[in-house]
Image: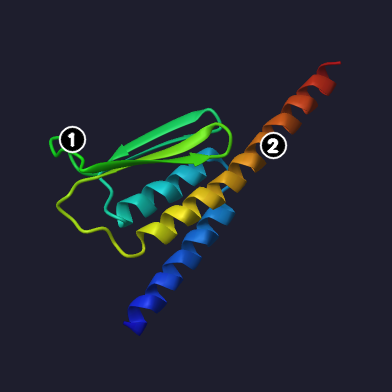
Amino acid sequence: MILRVVKEEIYLQELQSFLTNANTSDDCWAVVRTACKDMHFASVQMYLHGESYMEEFIPSEFEPSWKMNLIIGRHGYLSLTRVSERRPPKLMTPVLELLQDAIEQKEEHLVRQASAARQHVISGAA
């Protein structure tokens, strides 16, 4: 029991570190994709800062037993599905909370970066 809790805490800390080091929407997607695969989701779709991503881990011939949508910032989301054949990992809720919070912060950072880049282009053109 204690070993499992330690492993879960290490996983969450590593996940946080990967998200902290993600600099682009593509980087965030790579982390989300890996975490969702680790949590045995059937599929994940992410929309972040104008970019759309989708991965199917379990063939669509299996009917999803549930679908969850997590809002990320003003315009982003994660859409996740699971099939009923597996019991969800105990770590699933903390992982989803971490993904939602960390990516929401990244989304704000990406918006500021894009705005600064537009300002630079506009001032350079003047």
The number of callouts visible is 2
**Quarter of the image with the N terminus in it:** bottom left
- Residue that sits furthest to the right in the current view: 126
Structural distance between the alpha carbons of marks 1 and 2:
37 Å
On the rendered image, what quadrant is the C terminus found in? top right
Q: Which residue is mark 1?
A: 60
Residue under numbered circle 2: 113
Where residue 10 appears, as percent x and y from the top left, is 45, 72
Q: Does residue 9 lie above or below 97 as drawn?
A: below
Q: Is residue 17 left or right of residue 5?
A: right
Using residue 4 as the reference point, say whether residue 42 is left or right of it: left
**Amino acid type, callout 2:** Gln
Q: Position of residue 61 (x, y in %)?
A: 13, 35
22 to 55, vertically: above or below: below
Mark 2 residue crowding within 10 angstroms, few (<14) / some (14–19) / many (20+)? few
- Among all residues in the image, which is located at the extreme bottom? 2
Q: Percent x, y for residue 27?
A: 50, 45
The amino acid at mark 1 is: Ser
Identity of the residue drawn at 28% across and 48% down: 41
Protein image colouring: rainbow
